[in-house]
Image (tube, grey):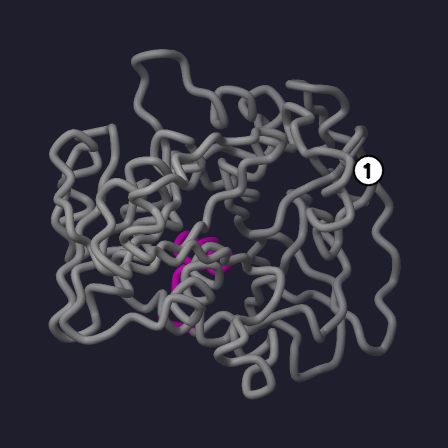
Amino acid sequence: MARALWHVAPGRCELREERVRIPAADELQIRTLASGVSRGTERLVHHGRVPPSQHAVMRCPMQEGELSFPVKYGYAAVGLVEQGPAEWIGRRVFALHPHQTRFVAPIAMCAPVPEAIPDRRAVLAANMETALNVMWDAAPRLGERAMVIGAGVVGLLCAFLLARIPGVQVCAVDRDPARAKLARSLGAEFFTPDAAPAEQELLIHASASEAGLRLALDRAGFEARLLEASWFGDAEPSLPLGAAFHQKRLQLISTQVGSVSPAMRGRRAYTDRMALALALLDDPRLDALVGPSVPFAELAASMSALLDPPAGAAQPLCPIILYDQ
């Protein structure tokens, strides 16, 4: 038997018992060690804000139920293989599975976690995979001025990757000045929106807000590339696409992790992309993106506060669920 988190109504969760089936020859049974909460997407699911037209698109690989409730949702699980082919027993894997104490997953959907990556940091694999796909879509150039708007997990990971490219001047922009120290530790300058510099050549928007997207358009330089990495759910942002947008010949580009970037499609499969994402997590500085930690037994009662902290409270980046506590 296992227990799983289910969203049963807008703003309400519960833990349910489930029977774990015997794995087939091409499957693994996994005992979960940790899972991460993707606050942006899971907040939309938790509040029932995924529009019906996007239910199929937003469906997780091993989701159960429907986004109209009840639904078992999540995609950042790290676990230990307990049953399956002998070569897999005892190995740690990352899988796109909802929050659940034990589960069965196809081997093809399980990525081995490198020994150097601790469980805590490995839950960032899905976020790093998103950031990696953004980089493939963005095709950053040496020496560019690059701005990331939204210093959440994906935004900071994008800044972290950009800062590894020689000559790129990277800055992160966020309303929360408490993110400044973390952004700088990852190699990016930090600005609040009112102080964000202009004439940026590559802009990545990851704030999921209309204000952030408007700021990106305003700070873009001539013929800049602006990549929209946010997911707005049922919101419909209004944008100023008038004279300045055309006069500056801006490119507004959608980027989304559901498909491998055209720049690498045909050369890299989903498994290759995930393996690279896990390898890119081999940096202790990224531990600062994870937390706070919550025991799985307390998750149903804690989820709302993790997704929507009270006014004035610190905004967590990637809350982590621990299963052995």
Q: Is residue 125 magenta?
A: yes
User: Which quarter of the figure has residue 222?
Assistant: bottom left
From the viewer's perspective, is residue 183 above or below residue 45? below
Specify the quadrant of the image occupied by residue 150: top left
Residue at image position (35%, 30%) is 211
At a point 76% along the width and 69% down the height, the residue shown is: 106
**In x, y percent, where is residue 118?**
39, 60
Task: Look at mark 1 in the image and give the residue it sits on.
Answer: 66
Measuring 46% from the left and 41% from the top, which residue is drawn there?
320
Q: Is residue 20 above or below residue 47?
A: below
Does residue 285 belong to the magenta stretch? Answer: no
- Which residues make up the magenta segment? 115-126
- Kindly identify the amino acid type of the residue bearing the numbered disc 1: Glu
Place of residue 5 in the rendered image (x, y in percent of width and height, measured from the top left): 69, 34
Residue 59 located left or right of residue 226: right
CA neighbours of label 1 inside 10 A, class few (<14), some (14 to 19), many (20+): some
In the depicted structure, whether residue 8 falls above or below residue 42: above
How many marks overall? 1
